[in-house]
Every structure is written in structure tokens, then in C-alpha cells.
Amino acid sequence: MGNGTAEQGIRGKAAPQHPLLRRLPLIAVALAALFGAIFLRDTLSFETLAENRENLLAFRDSHYLPSVLGFIAAYVAIVAFSLPGATIATLTGGFLFGAFPGVLYNVAAAGTGAVCIFLAARWGLGARLAARMDAGEGLVKRIKAGIDDNQWSMLFLIRLVPAVPFFVANLVPALVGVPLFRFAVTTFLGIVPGAVVYTSVGAGLGEVFARGETPDLGIIFEPRILLPILGLCALAALPMVLKLVRGRKGL
């Protein structure tokens, strides 16, 4: 009787997964990113969008829902596999669907792709790395503790600051043990300002194409755009500043 119970208990326990199996999604992302950097850099470009604009508009007009679903699926894949062309995809969303609802499609696609790569990184490396950082000593542990104490602010900051690469903002939170819900909320909300700017630029591409020009993607660094975004960054950083001041004053 006792042996039977013991055998059932052993069978009930899930066999430990091989480390390579856990890393397969992250390996797939890395290989796809390498493939994209080598072979797709010239394909997912503004020139390609300009050359195919009439066909894209015609397909949108005759098959609106499939065009929306196809666009979102393609954008999710671009972000999830860190392929080149995320900015072009955002412009395309504005060009095909207007500033609104194009911005909704762009945020939904970019946010979903970010969650996918976050999950791949966390499943493959993040959980173990975060546990090691928690169990570590000295500087590493202090850095991890500092991130944990200010996760909301830090996550919003890396989304709002234009200089932080999008794939970096997707991977780093997974490697330091950020919860999925917190990552998802700050991602979907934090990418809205930049998405609004680039979707609006995309919505005006018809005139740009007519003049034979290329869009000014540096518009986000113009004072009228950058200053409000920096204001949002300051608001995101405010809780960290208050904690620092209170800590020094012993409040």
C-alpha cells in the first residue's frame, strides 16, 4: 500500500524540463533577429512601402477586416522576433488606417509583440537570473533591490525615453523578474505617446509620397514633441526622487 502511494506520488510530479527546452523560444527569437538583420533590412523599408502603397490601399479598401488582422499579425511578428521595420510598421498603420484608429492597431500590435518576447526571455533565462540576483551579495543584490523598489517608475521611464531601444525595454524587465501584469500595463500605456507621433506621421504619408520625399522621423526630437514626453518622464521619475529624498531625510 505504501509503495503504491509512493509510486503515485513520483508519477504525479512533473519531470524537470531540460534547460534547452526552456530556452527554445528565446533561441528562436535570436535566430529570427539575426535572419532579419541580414536578409530583411532592405525589405521592411520606407522604399518598399512607397513602391507597394497603391496595392496596399486597394487591398484595404476591398478587404478591410483581413487587412487589419494581417497588419496586426505582421507587426506582432516584427516586434516578437526583433525584426527590423518596427518604425516602418507604425508608419504603415497610420498610412493605411489613419491617425485613428491606426494608433489603436499600432499600440495593440506593438504591445502584444513586446509581451511575447518578454515571456520568451523570462521563460528561458529571466526566472533563474532573477533568483540568482536575489540570492547574490553586494552590488548585484542592491541593484536588483533598487529595481524592485521602483519598478513602475523604471518601466514607464524606459518606455517614454526615446533613446532606449524597444527590444532593450522588452528584454531587461524579463531578466530582472518583473511581473507580467506590471510589464504589460506599463508597455501598453508607455508606448502610446510615441505611437501617436509616428502614427500621425504615417497618416500624412500620402502627401509625402506625392512630393517624392521621405518622412521626417526625427520629429519626435523636436521641442514641441519632445518636451511633453520629457514632462511625462519627469512624472514617472517623481516617485523615485521622493523615495530618495525621504530616505536621506529619514522620513
Image (tube, rainbow, N blue to C red):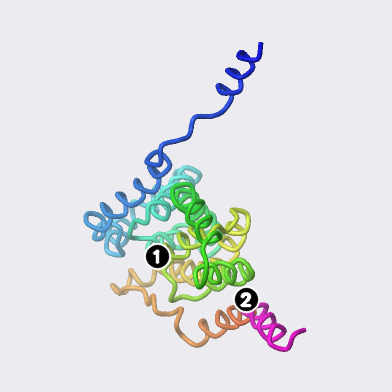
- Position of residue 157 in the picture relative to residue 166 (left or right): right
Query: Can you tell which quarter of the image residue 157 is in?
Result: bottom right
Residue 236 bears which disc, if any?
2
Q: Is residue 143 visible?
A: yes
Measured from the top left, where is residue 103 in percent x and y?
Answer: 53, 62
- Position of residue 156 in the picture relative to residue 213 (left or right): right
The residue sitting at 39% across, 61% down in the picture is 86
Q: Which residue does the numbered mark 1 point to in the structure image? A: 87
Where disc 2 sits, the SS reads helix
Residue 53 bears which disc, if any?
none
In magenta, the rendered stretch is 237-251
- In this view of the protein, which residue sits in the foreground, 5 or 13? 5
- In this view of the protein, which residue sits in the foreground, 152 or 64? 152
Q: Residues within 10 Å of mark 2 (few under 14, many from 20)?
A: many
Amino acid under label 1? Thr
Magenta stretch encompasses residue 136: no
**Residue 103 sits above or below residue 109 on the image:** below
The residue sitting at 45% across, 71% down in the picture is 201
Measured from the top left, where is residue 214 in percent x and y?
Answer: 32, 73
Question: Which residue is the extreme one toward the top?
Answer: 1
Amino acid under label 2? Ala
- Between marks 2 and 1, how big is the CA–CA gap? 24 Å
- In this view of the protein, which residue sits in the foreground, 111 or 217? 111
- In this view of the protein, which residue sits in the foreground, 188 or 58? 188
